[in-house]
Structures are given as C-alpha cells and as structure tokens.
Amino acid sequence: MTGVTIGSAAKATSVKVPTIRYYEDVGLLPRAPRTDSNRRLYGPDELARLRFIRHARELGFEVDDIRALLALQSEPQQTCTEVDAIARSHLTEVERRIESLLALKSELERMIKGCKRGRIAQCRIIEVLQNHAQCAHHPRG
C-alpha cells in the first residue's frame, strides 16, 4: 500500500484534517484505504481531488455543486453544458450576495454618518438598530 497519511495530505493540499474527514463522510472524497495500523493513505488522484474541492470551496461553490462537478469531470467526453449551468447559477448567487453586501455597506455608512458621537441616548446607530423601520435598504413596515 502506497500513499501519504492524512496529515501529509492536509499539508500538501492546504485542506485541514477534519475537513478531509468531512469530505469523505459526505462522499466528495472516496474512503481512503487503511494501513494495518488503521491509518488512511491518499494517492495522487485523491490529492488532486482535494485540491479541486478546496479551490471550488474558495470560489464559494456549495458541496452539492462540487459533487456534481466532480461527477461531470469523470466524463470528459460530455459537453460542458451542465458545468456551465452550475457556474452560471453560482455567479447569479454571488451577484445577489454582492448586491446585498453593497446595501449593507450603504446602510452602515448612513448610520455612521448620522452618528453625532454624543451620548448613547442620542446615538443614531443604536436608534436604527432598535427600529428596523429606519433602515434605508429594507422596506418600511
């Protein structure tokens, strides 16, 4: 049996040991063969798969999407239509999050600008946080 231990795999791929175990548990990574002393061993294919998963997670892909991408990757002769659809769907979600974060940024800037740096009793930030109806980025009501 050849391969590297889970600790060495973690170092080689920048994926933490508990995360590697989690990926095995959820089926993103096949169960590693074990030595006689019950230590997991990972080969080059598993390390490449871990790097793929790590990069996809860094880009914000969800586990189910990564699972689908890995399955599609194993069929290199297929068209990339489904891969494209997954990436486009993810892009739409990223754009939605950016829009939400920009609204949040704007609201925080407005709250801070309204702060007179006086006493808590007159603090605009506290006032807005206590009364959601005063938020500019949400419908009143």
Image (tube, rainbow, N blue to C red):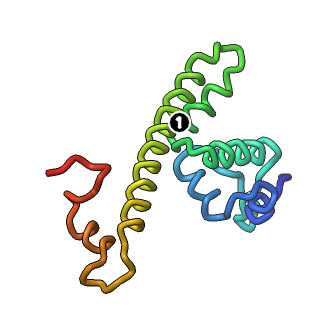
Q: Residue 120 sits in which quadrant?
A: bottom left
Residue 105, relative to residue 77: is it above or below?
below
Which residue is situated farthest in the right direction here? 2
Image location of residue 47, percent across then percent down: 77, 48
Image location of residue 139, percent across then percent down: 22, 47
Q: Residue 76 sits in which quadrant?
A: top right
Depth check: give the residue in front, 87 or 34: 87
Q: Residue at x 54, y 53 (%)?
A: 25
Q: Is residue 8 left or right of residue 127?
A: right
Q: Residue at x 19, y 57 (%)?
A: 133
Depth check: give the residue in front, 92 or 73: 92
The secondary structure type at the circle numbered 1 is: helix
Which residue is situated farthest in the left direction here? 141
Q: Residue at x 77, y 58 (%)?
A: 9
Name the kind of residue labelled 1 in the image. Asp
Depth check: give the residue in front, 95 or 133: 133
Image location of residue 8, percent across then percent down: 80, 62
| Residue where numbered disc 1 is placed | 65
